Amino acid sequence: MKRVLFICTGNYYRSRFAEELFNALASDAHAAWQADSRGLLQGNQSGNIGPIASVTQEALAARGIKLSLPIRFPKKLVEDDLFRADRIIALNEKEHRPLIAYLFPDWTEKVEYWKIGDMDVLAPQEGILQIEQHVKELFHALTAAS
């Protein structure tokens, strides 16, 4: 099984939506790919309340994607996560490249960076649509190459 790792700031909204959407696509297609997600900041640093953003839950439900219960809390990125991934994607280059360079300098150039801003930059509905488009494109590219 090959692995995609989605990274965002708090593993609460963007990376979680990308992970769940990718895994739903992979499950439906019986693809040999699996996604996971992590955050660069956790706890008091992230400002998250609860296990996952309500906008993420709502967007997944609208697409018929059910979260496993109990819903897991955000997970902080550790270097082992990077080693285990076949493809690593940070959801926003401007926001995440400096954090990755600081926390994991050897990995900065091994990460693919998208340009999907957080809720303070981009309305969540637009962010969800952009993530969905990118994830579907990625999924089709990975499965076409297999």
Image (spheres, rainbow, N blue to C red):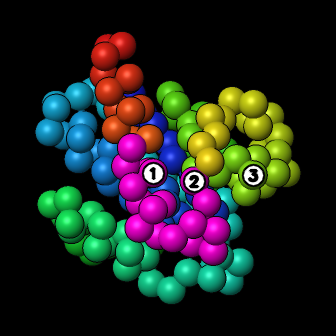
Q: Which residues are magenta?
A: 116-133
Q: Residue at x 57, y 66 (%)?
A: 122
Q: Which mark is residue 116?
A: 2
Among numbered discs 2 and 3, the one appearing first in the sequence: 3
**Which callout, 1 or 3, points to the residue nearer the camera?**
1
Residue density around tag 1, few if under 14, some if 14–19, many if 20 or more, within 10 Å: some
Query: What residue type is disc 3 on?
Result: Lys
x, y percentage for residue 132?
37, 49
Q: CA gap, disc 1 to disc 2?
A: 7 Å
Along the horizontal axis of the image, is 128 left or right of 89? left
Give the answer, above or below, for where 68 lies relative to 137.
below
Residue density around tag 2, few if under 14, some if 14–19, many if 20 or more, within 10 Å: many
Among numbered discs 1 and 2, the one appearing first in the sequence: 2
Along the horizontal axis of the image, is 98 left or right of 12? right
x, y percentage for residue 9?
63, 63
Among numbered discs 1 and 3, the one appearing first in the sequence: 3
Q: Which mark is residue 130?
A: 1
Check if residue 60 falls in the magenta segment: no
Query: What residue type is disc 2 on?
Result: Ile
Provide the residue designation for mark 3: 94
User: Which quadrant of the structure image shows residue 120?
Assistant: bottom right
Q: Residue at x 27, y 27 (%)?
A: 32
Secondary structure at numbered mark 2: loop
Quarter of the figure that contains the N terminus: top left
Residue 82 in view in this figure: no
Residue 61 in view in this figure: yes
